[in-house]
Amino acid sequence: MSQKTTQNATSAICIKCICINASHSEDGLQGPARPGRDWFQLAERLTAKGNAVFEDSTVHESEAGTADPKAVALALLARTIGKFGAAVLLLNNGYVVEAMTMTRCATDMHTFQIGPKTGAGVSWADAPEMQGPRLDRAPTHVAIAAAGSYLPGEPILTEEIEARIAALSPGLRLRRGLLRSLTGIETRHHLPDCMQASDLAVEAARRALDSAGASTRDIDLLVWGSASQDLVEPATAHIVAAKLGLRCPVFDVKNACNSFLNGMQVATALLRSGDYRSALVVTGESPSRAIRWVVEDLKAFFESAAGYTMGDAGAALLLTRDPKVEGIFFQKFLAASDRWSLATLPGGGSMHPRGDEWSYFRGNAVQLRDAFLQIGTGLLTAALHGTGTAMEDFARIFCHQVTRPFIAPFCATTGIPPEKLVVTVAELGNIASATIPTQIARAIEAGDVARGDQLPAPSLLTANA
């Protein structure tokens, strides 16, 4: 529970509790907190119906057997659960710092951060950074055992990109040096025609296995986490497995630039369950295949500009379950799904099953930036608080990078020290989901991180990498 919970000299904790009749499940107290939930109005309504009572309680250390706030809270829940079917805990002297719900039949508890009491309560709009699941440090005992990355071909200068666009687009008047000044990207890599996205992942996977002294026989699960793919069907993970000679279960996880982190999230959960001992999470990003080289005018150029920032790369992380280490101890994602149309590669699905026109990447960089700024840093701030960490605790910090000019405002907004970032965008361009695993592989190879270091991604926190 929150360390803001008050504790007096007699080792007692004062807690305000609302006891609720569990038969009134329509009030939504037996599941996760919902956006817009107003706990104060809910409590007042239930109390008026006779289905809830407020109770101020003082729980002594002797009753809980410890002064730990979470254990004391559990003791109070156990004591009050007999009066009504469920209980909600409100802590910290009239301020709703946290709420916990528990029912008679529950073996687990849902924990929420709600926010300080203001008037009749706090809504999602009033304090979005305080709403949502409690962000506790939760050891998974799943560690990063090895990392590998791969870049195809020789570096391609931004000036070469501009020259190719100009040569193929006679109607376009493009100021020389515009791309470099807008993006800060100097070079990137493009895979040759004879290679596929899966080949990038295969090369990275071999490097990860070699660095760990492992073989393909040691892999229990393969997860492809990439925005790119070889074919619509079958899963690209099958193609990677065939090229590596694997016989283990495989599947794809696809979610744009978060694909790899989501793949890690799924693999971590499966390893933690005990179903597998090791998992190879791979990506092969080939966005160069979706670049529009022929554009009619500046408007079309800027609609296609995101493609000119992108590079190709492969990356892989070997995850293993090790009960002796804490491993990945925090993972949390948010989605602004209403902004899905800001960056698209439209072809290949049911919307646009055919036609070259739909095979090019298009996006609105300004609106994407604004969307990020509107989402804000609440999740990162809450993650640091909930896991008891600070920026100075991390050896290096990894983050997705789309252009170099965005790094400074990103650091200023999040409070991330620029010197802790592993910056790759100037040299590699935007390599989509391969960005973070490539940064991890490079940091390990350079000796910038070692076993036991804490590494934020910043959607993923891990120790004992």
Image (cartoon, rainbow, N blue to C red):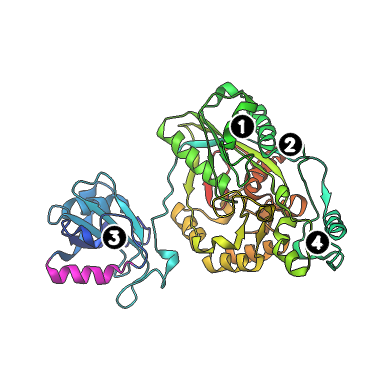
Q: Quadrant of residue 339?
A: bottom right
Q: Which mark is residue 195?
A: 2
Query: Which element carries disc 4, helix, strand or loop?
Result: helix
Query: Which element carries disc 3, helix, strand or loop?
Result: loop
Q: Residue at 83% across / 49% down in the picture?
A: 156
Q: Quadrant of residue 308?
A: bottom right
Residue underneath mark 1: 239
Name the kind of residue labelled 4 in the image.
Arg
Q: x and y percent of residue 302 in the render?
A: 73, 66
**Nearer-N-terminus badge (3/2):** 3
Name the kind of residue labelled 2 in the image.
Met
Are circles 2 and 4 on residues that touch, CB within 8 Å? no
Query: Which element carries disc 1, helix, strand or loop?
Result: helix
Q: Residue at 32% across / 62% down in the picture?
A: 6
Q: Which mark is residue 180?
A: 4
Q: CA distance from mark 3 to mark 2?
A: 69 Å
Identify whether 144 is placed above or below 366: above
Find the residue positioned furthest to the front.
354
Are circles 1 and 3 on residues that touch, CB within 8 Å? no
Which-is-in-front pick, marks 2 and 4? 2
Which-is-in-front pick, marks 4 and 3? 4
Name the kind of residue labelled 3 in the image.
Ala
Q: CA distance from mark 4 to mark 1?
A: 36 Å
Q: Main secondary structure of the magenta part?
A: helix
Q: Give yes or no for residue 44 being in the magenta stretch.
A: yes
Residue underneath mark 3: 9
